Image: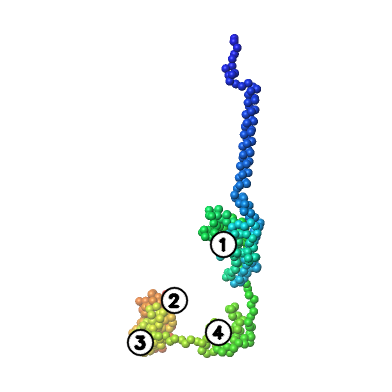
Amino acid sequence: MGDYNDPYQDNNQSDSDYQFSHQKSRKVWLFVGIILFIMAIGTIAFIFTNNPEETKDADIGIDRKDIILDVLTSKDTYGIHEEISGEYYLKYQGEPFKGAVICCSDKGCSRAIGMIDDIDFNDPAKTRYLKTELTGFFQDEGTYNYSIYIYDCNDINEAFNRDDCSGGMGIYAKEILEKVIPLKSKSKSIVVIEEEEEYIPECTVNENCTQICTNCDRGTYICASSSDVSIDQTCVECINSFGCVDGYECEDYECVEEEPEEEPEYNVTDPETVMDCFSEDLSEAYCDGDTVLAFTYLFEDRLEPCEISDGTFGLGWEPIFGIFRGYEIQEEQGDNCVVKFWFLENLVIDPSLLGKEMVCEYGPSQRNTQYVSECLEECCTGELVDAMNELTQ
């Protein structure tokens, strides 16, 4: 059998050649890995050292510790209507930068833009136009807040994609507060309360009030003892009109001359019925009181002799409730005078009383308006009696 020839023998490396080649390859990849690692470290270092967000303040030299902000007031609690005075305070002596100062209260915010360099609000020569005064009066109790903020204009420009952070670019202070983080801020709250003033009585008895009062019944002021705290234990001219002389009345605790009462003008002087003396809703009187009463007196004059007649009148308290009567004296039966009654229509009377009648009888001693007003069921019969009883139940 001849020698066996490996067909792959010429194409494969010997063991020694193979090991050498393998070691060489590992060194190449190791070298490549080291190069990539160095490049990665360099890239990371570049990112951290060149991040504008981390370095921009350092580039212009802004150190937040150099910024001093405060809200200064003389005290922390004020009374209503007391003037509150103070100031927003800023001090900075670092590297100059263009900035915005925003000062806010419960009424709103003010803003100023300018270079921030060697600023001290305590030094009038260095305040420029950045300083805002803190003043005001308050009508209500409560807690009121004040704040001051300082911004780098670069931060505002970046947030709003602007080249100039000035107010002329249409950026409002409120938008800056909501969207941009300030370099520094300071806030303070004050409390407004209703102060109770010490009450010192002006008098305790009338003799303490010596001021002359010409129109007063006593001739001098009197010491008011009243549940009205505005006048209690104070000297006043009067408390009511009894404290004034004739022709004067007490108005706002002073005796003032009475104004003459104007006589009402009546445009009906000869009414045919009592209803002619009033408007339909009884809000206006067209006749004087004597004319209205004349209808009642006429009814009584006719009732006493039982004179056959008819008319209208107001009886007793009925006109107060908007009720007026129509009547017809019909006849005399024996000793009784027979009278028919009904109610007149207007905008005030209860509709259930309208269109109904009652017939009443009165003896010789009963023929007067007082008895007619008091005697109903004993003297009268008819639908109107039932309707009147239903309303009073």
Q: Is residue 271 above or below residue 52?
A: below
Query: Which residue carries the number 2 mark?
Result: 392
Q: Indicate the secondary structure of the residue bearing disc 2.
A: helix
- The location of residue 187, given as percent across then percent down, is 62, 61
Observer-nearest of 294 and 386: 294
Observer-nearest of 272 and 53: 53
Query: Which residue carries the number 3 mark?
Result: 270
Q: CA distance from mark 3 to mark 2?
A: 35 Å
Quarter occupied by residue 286: bottom left
Q: Indicate the secondary structure of the residue bearing disc 3.
A: loop
Q: Is residue 24 above or below residue 272?
A: above
Between disc 2 and disc 1, the foreground one is: 1
Quadrant of the frame with the N terminus: top right
Between disc 4 and disc 1, the foreground one is: 1
Q: Please state which amino acid type lies under the numbered disc 3.
A: Asp
- The location of residue 214, given as percent across then percent down, is 56, 89
Q: CA distance from mark 2 to mark 4?
A: 46 Å
Q: Is residue 345 left or right of residue 95?
A: left
Query: Which residue carries the number 1 mark?
Result: 111
Q: Please state which amino acid type lies under the numbered disc 4.
A: Glu
Query: Which residue carries the number 4 mark?
Result: 254
